[in-house]
Amino acid sequence: MEKSYRPNLHLALMHYPVMNKNGDVIASAVTNLDLHDISRAAKTYGVRSFYVVTPLADQKSLIEKIVSHWVSGAGAKYNPIRREALELIRIKDSLAKVTDHIRSQGEGTPKTVVTCARDYDRSISYSSFQDMLKNRSSYLLIFGTAWGLSENFISKADYILEPIKGNTDYNHLSVRSAASIILDRLLKLDVRC
Amino acid sequence: MEKSYRPNLHLALMHYPVMNKNGDVIASAVTNLDLHDISRAAKTYGVRSFYVVTPLADQKSLIEKIVSHWVSGAGAKYNPIRREALELIRIKDSLAKVTDHIRSQGEGTPKTVVTCARDYDRSISYSSFQDMLKNRSSYLLIFGTAWGLSENFISKADYILEPIKGNTDYNHLSVRSAASIILDRLLKLDVRC
């Protein structure tokens, strides 16, 4: 079974600009297991990098502390397999810094694809996005924390991915679950490009 | 779009008998976000109940405290949507107590289907399990915590589900990610029974 296919896909987890329960735009706090679960899923599906985005200095330093524990500290020795996943994490201030970084690696400007629990007129399907990945352009798949990405942020994205539908009307998955399911839908072996 | 299909499927998350890093059989500690993420995914995909299994009294009381906060305490008022998910949780001592409970609800004895990151000769595919769910028998899909379910426990299950393959050789997803992906593979709308 050939497993060398690696899409030109990057992930970003935004802690700003996201919404709180009342719809106000806020900067959210980092959740430790977001870093672990999403980097492990990213590694499983051959994603190139996982950007964790926050403008807050104390949050950036917390993320650095967690990541360095697992990448170069005691955790790296205790669990080298976990290190392989957390090595994908890059900490950035903003979306602009993320796209700059991807561009600086010679991959061109990535197209941005936001995820959201709501349907939009311009939402694209999983199969459309699979087709887009085949053209080997660079894509940045973006997840929000808290109550989701701000409407203004979503409106500026190149694409909006359709929401995950289970088989009920309940659509309140954690971002960890949503990221895992979306990577599986796009990239599992039987939907190879 | 008809969304009323509900498989006769229950989940169990085992904290005993599972393995530690060295392969010893242990009882693991409960992780708060396992309760949230897996109950939210279960609710999304129409799973009937989510059993959290541990023989340890202090762990059972911790789970009760977390669940009651969200189901009947301050959390239920703050976030009623979260309540709908955590209401699926039932706390039990052992697998035998889980199957007794399912039987006591008039659903017969469920067939047990264990999940595991390794392949076995007798592993069944996702599509086989989808076909089995169509016959409306009762099934209990079982996940392990820590380094996975004990070999002895796995050997006694009625079925073993094939591992999740991404598109790399890395297969170290969190149990939260694995449960989400497996429910999506089995039950998302386009694989309706």
Image (tube, coloured by chain):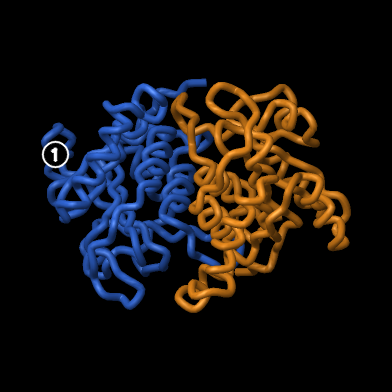
Chain colours: A blue, B orange
Q: Amino acid at mark 1?
A: Arg
**Which residue is found at the position 68% from the left and 56% from the top?**
B91
**On the image, which quarter does residue A80 sit in?**
top left
Instruction: Give the side of residue A127 with respect to residue A58, left or right.
Output: right
Q: Position of residue A52 (x, y in %)?
A: 26, 47
Secondary element at image label 1: helix
Q: Position of residue A34 (x, y in %)?
A: 38, 48
Check the picture and name the quadrant holding the C terminus of chain B: bottom right
Residue A169 visible in the shown view: no
| Along the line of sight, the residue nearer the viewer: B191 or A38 | A38
Work out whether B4 lies above or below A174: below
- Residue neighbourhood size for the residue with mark 1, other residues' Cα within 10 Å, grouped as few (<14), some (14–19), many (≥20): some
| Along the line of sight, the residue nearer the viewer: A92 or A79 | A79
Where does label 1 land, which residue? A103
| Along the line of sight, the residue nearer the viewer: A134 or B127 | B127
Q: Position of residue A120 (x, y in %)?
A: 37, 68
- Tally the marks: 1
Residue B78 visible in the shown view: yes
**Which residue is found at the position 68% from the left and 35% from the top?**
B17
Instruction: Give the side of residue B143 with respect to residue A176, left or right.
Output: right
Work out whether A119 lies above or below A166: below
Q: Chain of mark 1?
A: A
Check the picture and name the quadrant holding the N terminus of chain B: bottom right
**Which residue is found at the position 12% from the left and 43% from the top?**
A100
Q: Residue furthest front?
A: B58
Q: Position of residue A115 (x, y in %)?
A: 36, 57
